[in-house]
Image (tube, helix red, strand yellow):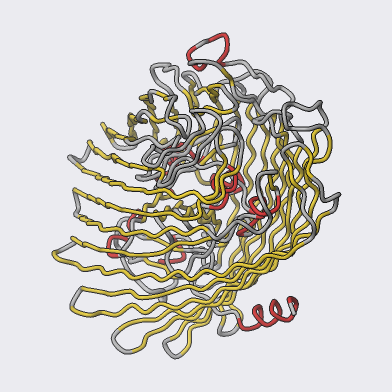
């Protein structure tokens, strides 16, 4: 029956990619919304070339969507994706060691299954991982350095997005063939060296083209016995096949990382004798992944049909240095899926219809070689395999109810089925519970409604009411602890109300959004490392961003965010730091954070900017007994266009050598920190050939 359902779904799969663009507008205002169902990862170049796309400005869409363009990504010259994304309103990412990180999109910084399952990471519109098999450090697999743009959708996704688009999504768009060969070489202190190289060709006036892109990074790290080496390869081919336009993309990624663990102790990040040390020199993370997708597009009789089969494979091994016992975890999965599309016009509006399907086979093996530490016992913890089927159907109608006023109404239904196969004895060992073979299935229904109106020239207002939902992660369901019972975990839901205003002109762009969200069945891990299965939280926030081109040589931009994330339930624990009282602030959730940028262009070909990054105070534990005071850090950047398409650039991180923590928390009875990098200089050269 499972095989029949999968085969049928793959055969009839209909889906949509909604692309919003308009020629002649600033590049940052064009947006590609490519989600779980979309799989339609077009770059800016393709939007301009393909005239049959639905054209709409980012400012007119009824949601808060931010975009980092190719030009802006080059200016930022980021070493880690967090450096670019933390300039986006509503985004707050904690960096760990090497390429590790934890994400916040209109949320606290979430860990474990919540951190993996609450955010959807996509490359060219396809999720980097299967929905129930996500990785909390998912950004390191994206081809950021090879990208044409990054888009961030805040709050629960539209009907096109399924599991994991709970608090938002991040989509990385790679370039299509454009007849430009590019290079970008950057070097920095602590042995950092990176290079990206792109070869591209495309026949004039047609679809035929191909490109190959390579990214290589090597970093010795600024802490003892840390560093990483990563390689990424991405190939694209475009062709016309009769009435169809075809785009094939394949990417490969390899990471070898020596991981630095938390430093511990009261304000340890301030101590020079501690902050550059590595208490876990044995820690590591090795990962490989391969992804491929084929997008076929056909326009006929006013409708657009998009057929997208895809496949992925990923494998990872790492030491769980962040918990007592430090077990080794091996985890991976492979998937095949189809994400196809149909959209067109009917009556006084347009419609979207979709149906998604995906089959995944994954595994997890956790083994502790060292001696027992408390309830973290020596020996095997878990060893299991899981087969998963995801089926989803959705629809949306965009109705022009009055001049310049649109009402969007839609819904998505999603079914997830897991078949769990335990490969080891079904017993309790220490805190770890291994259960017998079982099957679990989940069904979620997520309605959406949004209203948007242009009330003046380049001035839009909108209101949006949506529900987001996700089935539990595989690790939530089957990496159980002894206080849990199998089958007790329910699907997580997030109900969101949002209103916003967007203004754009030649000299001033302004956006503001306010939201209120309620989350049920919140699954998370408290500071004692124990799973909480039925949490409830409330989220209130305001995001304001602006960009002012004051003169030809001065540009001011920035954003400020206020967020109140609180527990909406009580949970007694053995210690004050772990006890949750209704109304307590959620830990690792600063109320105020933001950035400000002053950019100067004193003469043609040269620009420089200084960025101020502010992070406010936040609690480190659920009981609100420990705090991190926050920090302010400055980054200086500059670039000089040397002519003939070549540019020299440089940046200085942490300009005033501030002692701060990239991440702070309280766990297993002590404060823990990932210290921020000291003042560091990077220089580079990029261009076309």
Q: Is residue 207 above or below residue 609?
A: below
Residue drawn at (68%, 82%), measured in percent from left and top?
8
* Residue at the image point whose x is 33% and y is 29% from the top: 612
Seen as rendered, the residue at the extreme left is 456
Residue 660 percent location from the top left of the image: 45, 21
As drawn, 54 above or below 24 = below
In the depicted view, which residue is nearer to us: 624 or 4? 624
- Against 332, residue 661 (above or below) is above
Q: Name the residue at the top extreme.
A: 273
Residue 278 sits in which quadrant?
top right
| In the image: residue 91, left or right of residue 526 | left
Q: Nearer the viewer, residue 57 or 629?
A: 629
Inspect this view and state whether residue 197 appears. Answer: no
Q: Nearer the viewer, residue 186 or 30?
A: 30
| In this picture, residue 22 sits left or right of residue 619 | left
Quadrant holding the N terminus: bottom right
Residue name at image x 32 percent, y 35 percent: 592
Residue 96 can be seen, yes or no? yes
Q: Position of residue 256 (x, y in %)?
A: 71, 36
């Amino acid at each position: 029956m499972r095989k029949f359902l999968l085969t049928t779904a793959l055969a009839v799969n209909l889906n949509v990619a909604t692309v919003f663009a308009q020629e002649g507008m600033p590049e940052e205002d064009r947006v590609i919304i490519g989600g779980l169902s979309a799989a339609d990862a077009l770059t800016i170049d393709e939007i301009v070339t393909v005239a049959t796309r639905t054209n709409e400005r980012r400012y007119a869409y009824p949601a808060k969507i931010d975009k980092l363009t190719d030009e802006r990504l080059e200016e930022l010259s980021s070493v880690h994706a967090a450096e670019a994304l933390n300039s986006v309103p509503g985004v707050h990412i904690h960096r760990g060691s090497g390429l590790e990180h934890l994400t916040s999109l209109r949320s606290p910084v979430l860990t474990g299954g919540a951190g993996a399952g609450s955010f959807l990471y996509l490359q060219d519109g396809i999720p980097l991982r299967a929905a129930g098999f996500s990785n909390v450090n998912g950004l390191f697999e994206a081809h950021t350095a090879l990208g044409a743009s990054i888009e961030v959708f805040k709050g629960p996704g539209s009907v096109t997005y399924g599991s994991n688009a709970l608090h938002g999504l991040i989509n990385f768009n790679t370039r299509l063939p454009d007849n430009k060969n590019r290079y970008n070489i950057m070097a920095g202190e602590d042995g950092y060296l990176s290079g990206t190289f792109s070869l591209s060709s495309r026949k004039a006036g047609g679809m035929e083209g191909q490109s190959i892109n390579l990214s290589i990074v090597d970093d010795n790290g600024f802490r003892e016995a840390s560093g990483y080496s990563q390689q990424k390869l991405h190939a694209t081919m475009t062709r016309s096949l009769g009435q169809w336009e075809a785009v094939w993309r394949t990417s490969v990624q390899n990471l070898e990382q020596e991981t630095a663990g938390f430093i511990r102790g009261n304000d340890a990040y301030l101590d020079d004798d501690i902050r550059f040390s590595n208490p876990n020199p044995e820690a590591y993370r090795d990962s490989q992944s391969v992804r491929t997708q084929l997008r076929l597009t056909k326009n006929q009789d006013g409708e657009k049909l998009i057929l997208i089969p895809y496949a992925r494979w990923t494998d990872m091994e790492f030491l769980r240095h962040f918990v007592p016992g430090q077990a080794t975890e091996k985890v991976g999965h492979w998937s095949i899926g189809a994400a196809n599309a149909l959209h067109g016009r009917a009556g006084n509006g347009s419609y979207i219809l979709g149906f998604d399907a995906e089959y995944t086979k994954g595994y997890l093996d956790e083994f502790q070689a060292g001696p027992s530490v408390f309830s973290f016992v020596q020996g095997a913890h878990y060893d299991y395999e899981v087969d998963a089927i995801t089926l989803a159907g959705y629809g949306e109608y965009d109705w022009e109810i009055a001049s310049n006023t649109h009402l969007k109404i839609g819904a998505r239904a999603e079914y997830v089925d897991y078949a769990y196969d335990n490969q080891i004895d079904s017993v309790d060992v220490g805190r770890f519970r291994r259960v017998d073979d079982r099957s679990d299935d989940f069904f979620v229904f997520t309605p959406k409604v949004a209203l948007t109106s242009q009330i003046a020239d380049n001035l839009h207002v909108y209101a949006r009411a949506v529900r987001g939902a996700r089935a539990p992660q595989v690790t939530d369901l089957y990496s159980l602890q002894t206080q849990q019972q199998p089958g007790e975990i329910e699907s997580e839901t997030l109900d969101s109300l949002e209103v916003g205003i967007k203004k754009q002109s030649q000299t001033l762009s302004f956006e503001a959004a306010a939201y209120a969200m309620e989350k049920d069945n919140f699954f998370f891990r408290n500071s004692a490392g124990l799973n909480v299965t039925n949490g409830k939280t409330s989220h209130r926030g305001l995001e304001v961003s602006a960009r002012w081109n004051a003169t030809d040589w001065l540009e001011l931009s920035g954003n400020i965010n206020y967020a109140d994330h609180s527990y909406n339930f009580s949970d007694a624990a053995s210690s004050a730091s772990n006890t949750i009282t209704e109304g307590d602030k959620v830990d690792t959730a600063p109320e105020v954070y933001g950035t400000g940028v002053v950019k100067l262009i004193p003469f043609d070909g040269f620009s420089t900017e200084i960025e101020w990054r502010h992070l406010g105070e936040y609690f480190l534990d659920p009981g609100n007994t420990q705090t991190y005071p926050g920090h302010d850090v400055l980054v200086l950047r500059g670039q000089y266009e040397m002519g003939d398409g070549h540019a020299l650039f440089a940046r200085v991180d942490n300009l005033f050598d501030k002692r701060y923590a990239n991440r702070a928390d309280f766990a297993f009875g002590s404060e823990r920190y990932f210290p921020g990098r000291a003042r560091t200089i990077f220089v580079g050269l990029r261009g076309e050939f």
